[in-house]
Image (tube, rainbow, N blue to C red):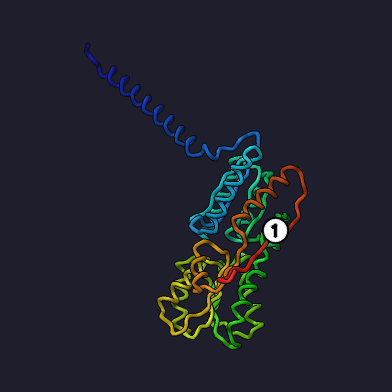
Amino acid sequence: MKYTASHLKHTLTLVLYCLTIFALSACSDADRSTSASDAPDNDVPKVGLVMKSLANEFFVNMSEQAKAHQNENQAQYSLLVNGTKNESDLAQQVALIDQMIASGMDAIVLAPADSKAVIPAVVRALKAGLVVVNIDNKLDESALTDFGVTVPFVGPDNEKGAYMAGQLASEQLQSGDAVIVLEGIPSAVNSTQRRDGFMRAINEKGLEVVALQSADWEQTKAAQVTSSLLIQHPDTKAIFAANDNMALGALAAVKRANLSQAPIIVGFDNIKAIAPHIASGDVLATVDQFGGQLAVFGIEKALSALAGEPLDDLTETPLELITKEL
């Protein structure tokens, strides 16, 4: 059979068409398989959990316990879980909230990266009819008021927890001793609350804060910051870190510094990675805020709101001081 240019053109067109259909079908199947476990059931409320850095053990634990809760309550709700790559990635967290809105979630449980800057995205969710429950890091009250909205908060009294740890450390120090305070992201309410709790304990004892610096909640940055500060202040007697990641970074810096007397270190969160250092005494104390349960508490509040129940503006969750003796 003789093939003309017209035949060849027609055949090529048909082949390209088939390949296109095959590719589209493959992409569609891939999309479905990727989201199948999170595919929302139209017959139950759809809840989205938006957290901060999934590189942080604290939020990994939160994610795992939230998924376990949903697995035990599949008939009550479906769950979509997501978080950012690092603690300060506000743009990514805002994008995640907008994705939750677009995907038809009924509620969002949010651990905000920033207490103020994320609020416009929260307002968009509320205007779209979603229930929003704030966990872990409290949204800024004045900013919420400026936007004319309220968002219930589920979480601990961070200032109280930091004061507990700071007070314990202060009992082993003398008035005038040098102290370094490592805070989280300064625009986060839980960071300022923990800083204030540390400062209350420090002021009561008459200690001297030789440095108050942010390490953005991150271990690597805390190690770098602490190394630099210890060169400037080698007589530092204590380091108060606003989370355990930063406490671990500070500990690494202390060990590298090879000081004649290692400073006392306290942290906050009670992540698994801090446990051996509490046991060895390298870290004096941390504060357990039962982070894994925070998301569960938030989810349960969101489900109650979706069922028409009124929510309290504040639901305070427990804290526990963790030391070698406990």
Which quarter of the rendering shows the N terminus?
top left
Q: Where 322 sits versus 37, above or below?
A: below
Q: Residue at the far top: name it.
A: 1
Determine whether the residue tagged by mark 1 lies in a helix, strand or loop.
helix
The one of 303 and 120 positioned closer to us in this rendering: 303
Q: Is residue 29 visible in this depiction of the protein? A: yes
Q: Which residue sits at x=54%, y=83%?
A: 210
Which quarter of the rendering shows the C terminus?
bottom right
User: Residue 155, located in which quarter of the rendered image?
Assistant: bottom right
Residue 112 lies, in percent from the top left, at 60, 57
User: Residue 200, located in which quarter of the rendered image?
Assistant: bottom right
- Amino acid at the residue labelled 1: Leu
Q: How many marks?
A: 1
Residue indicated by mark 1: 144
Q: Is 311 on the left or on the right of 29, as rendered? A: right
Q: Which residue sits at x=45%, y=77%?
A: 254
Q: Is residue 95 visible in this depiction of the protein? A: no
Q: Residue at the far left: name it.
A: 2
Residue 158 lies, in percent from the top left, at 65, 67
User: Residue 193, located in which quarter of the rendered image?
Assistant: bottom right
Q: Which residue sits at x=56%, y=86%?
A: 177
Q: Is 221 on the left or on the right of 64, as rendered? A: left
